[in-house]
Amino acid sequence: MNGTTITAPTIEYALLAPMLIVFGAALVGVLVEAFAPRYLRKSIQMPLTLLALIGAFVTTVLTALNGLPERAAAMGAVAVDGPSLFIWGIILILAFVSALLINDDDQFVAQAAAVPGSVDEEEAVRNGFAQTEVYPLLLFAVGGMLLFPASNDLLAMFVALEVMSLPLYLLCGLARRRRLLSQEASVKYFLLGAFSSAFFLYGTALVYGYAGSVDLRAISEALGSVSGQQTLLLVGVALLGVGLLFKIGAAPFQAWKPDVYQGAPTAVTALMASTVLVAAFGALLRVFWVALGNLDWDWRPVMWGVAILTMIVGAILAITQTDIKRMLAYSSIAHAGFLLTGVIATGSAAQNSQSLSAVLFYMAAYGFTTVGAFAVVTMVRDAGGEAGHLSRWAGLGKRSPVLAGIFAFFLLAFAGIPLTSGFFGKYAVFTAAVGGGALPLVIVGVVSSAIAAFFYVRVIVLMFFNEPAADGPSIAAPSVGTSAVVALAAAATVVLGVFPQPVLTLADQAASALFIR
């Protein structure tokens, strides 16, 4: 073997480099928390987090440029293919933007271990303590998000699910204000998330009992060779579906989303609403298209029902909300239903490629708009913190026309108005669904979009056509990070709405080879 030969382990390390960088930085962050003086931690953790995310994104791009492997890495457990790399890129960019938002100390409790309202908490605030553990927790969660959609066997996917979820359970309970509401959100998310993980693990066990393997390709091959155990298979698939649908917030597994989104620090809500949705949909696609693609006659009718229920529940219940974060949570549920129409649109290889490309583009477009919307929410404040109640947003267009205009633009993008990224996202997904024979589902999606447009426009009318209250909320001076987040999100929403072709081309290229099998 000469000095220029590249060995297989070296190639695998290169393929897994984005995840290794993120997890390595997370471990370094833990050491910083353990040994660095408190006054130095913030100045170390923030640059470390941003550099790790940039490094992981650069290695993702280099991996894509160097050509895709023909088989899964890490002994077949991780599939680094076109869809995985595109999803990794989306997650890393959105995580970077969310990290800029998380940099605002005013959102996080000074000392998480202190009892809300206690003397210890007041002393921590006076001393200027900052909860810098959020940075390694963010990196661990992002590492899990990278592994989740790339997992090529169900056990690796379960490990990724837990690595992604456990840091988020903690982050949800670290809000600086409304501490009890934040801790309630954390406990609800943990309990319901633990149930969903148990469903996923039990489903894995049943599918293993049917196929004799947890490898996705082996499960797919077993569908045509194993007979007499259909009940075991179908129950296992149902349980796997529950675990995955919970993570995307699809109905009837959406109950956690409004409470958690409302109680968590808004920067963490932005992270979850964008990156977790992308990672969970990537995992859902891999399980149902790679492992269970030959079983689509059985799971597609169920997915039809879930998609219809999700779109309707998200659109209608959002109308009844009076809290801005809860309204955006139900909006997220509706968008999960729109994305499910792309998951259902299977058929020929060309049809699958078109559907996958549409879903990838939609996730990118929705992610940027979501982060931008929640960044705006962090700046509208009253005496108790963020002004969550919709009545407090009345007349915001007269108090701060620029901020209100940007938020209105994000809402129009959610509604799918032309010249915004949301329009092309919905157009791509619905076109793919029509091509896959799901026209009735598209009709439901269009009607749900029209319903959803009502509550988006209602907020716009409230901001621009109502008089502001004398004691209305103030507009906090944004930090450099928050300003950058809003600017980047607005720019992405405009560019993807006016000139979407470059990203659509990237999505087409990523989807052209489909998943490694």
Image: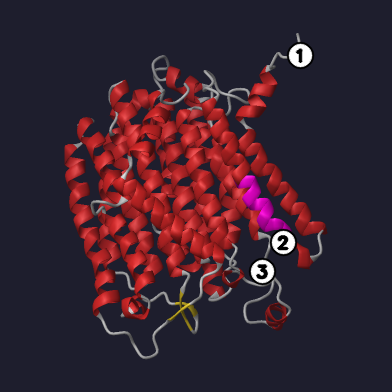
The stretch drawn in magenta includes residue 311: no
Question: Does the residue at mark 1 contact the one at mark 2 (Cβ under 8 Å)?
Answer: no
Helix, strand or loop under label 1:
loop
Checking the image for residue 112, the label placed there is 3
Helix, strand or loop under label 3:
loop
Helix, strand or loop under label 2:
helix
Q: Gap between marks 2 and 3, in whole Å? A: 20 Å
Q: Percent x, y for residue 200? A: 49, 41
Identify which amino acid the numbered label 1 is placed on: Gly
Q: Residue at x 41, y 34 (%)?
A: 285
Q: Residue 61 falls in which quadrant of the image?
A: top right
Disc nearer the start of the sequence (1/2): 1
Who is closer to the viewer here, 6 or 299?
6
Mark nearer the viewer, 2 or 3: 2
Identify which amino acid the numbered label 2 is placed on: Ser
Is 108 located above or below residue 145 in the figure?
below
